[in-house]
Amino acid sequence: MAGHSRWANIKHKKGAADKRRSTLFTKLVKEIYVAAKVGGPNPDSNPRLRLAMQNARGQSVPKDNIDRAINKASGAGAESFTDVMYEAYGPGNVGLIIECTTDNLNRTIANLRTYLTKTGGSLANNGSLNFVFEQKGVFEFTKPEGTDLDELTLEVIDGGADEVEEEDGFISASCAREDFGSLSKKLDELGITPEKSELQYVPKIFKQVSNEDAAKLAKLLDNLHNDDDVKVFYHNVEFSEELAEILN
């Protein structure tokens, strides 16, 4: 990936999450609720719920919050939600994939159009960004104390990882979509609970933006992050230290 540091992207996302922990908790608990509502309350037979609970634990969401969300989803009259994905172009022609979980599609798309229009972006037809992104499994975790990094890297690669990056004890491992389950199992065998484990849309083509467009993008990303209907979003901005400061 010449000219691009995915680690800079990871640090940006992690820093943003640290500053907005309350919003992050809300989204994690909502995903647990929706997963239990759709696939049932037993994580052993519901992979989506199992993954949602793992991600919540990785971010230190209290067990009571997790149990409450599952119990609420199992109760009578529980709300129904729909998963939907949108593609868009943001300021500077940045590609965006936005995954939402919503109980009101009209509200969700109206909000997205407003955020995009105010920052010079627009929605795109689904499939427009197939050439820009590929879906990969991504696991982010802290290196266990006392673990040899080289040995850990070999173990993770043996589990299916095709790329492992480390900085200051924080590790990101990626794998092909079809190897997600095997890598998740390997980390579990190693006693590692990831702070994040999910299928992500990883850029294949990156976009440089001006400082002016970066400021607009920062506003757009902030709106997306704070929207309760937005589950997660991805973009293909090529990071620099200066740009990371603007976006943070």
Image (spheres, rainbow, N blue to C red):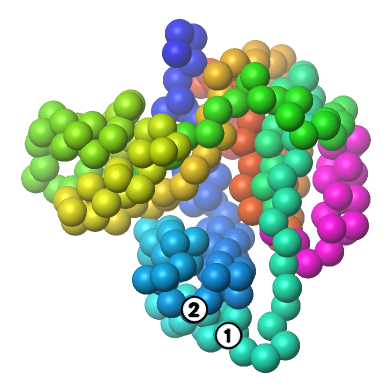
- x, y percent for residue 173: 34, 35
Mark 2 residue crowding within 10 angstroms, few (<14) / some (14–19) / many (20+): many
Q: Residue at x 44, y 62 (%)?
A: 47
- Where, by quadrant of the figure, is residue 58 drawn? bottom left
Side of 54 where 78 appears, left or right:
right
Q: Residue at x 52, y 50 (%)?
A: 17
**178 within the magenta span:** no
Q: Say which element carries label 2.
A: loop
Q: Which mark is residue 74?
A: 1
Earlier-in-chain disc, 2 versus 1: 2
Residue type at tag 1: Ser
Are the two marked residues, 2 and 1, in contact with CB atoms closer than 8 angstroms? yes
Front-most of residues 110 and 84: 84
Query: Where does the magenta region start and end?
Result: 101-119
Taking 16 as reference, is 163 above or below it? above
Q: Which mark is residue 41?
A: 2
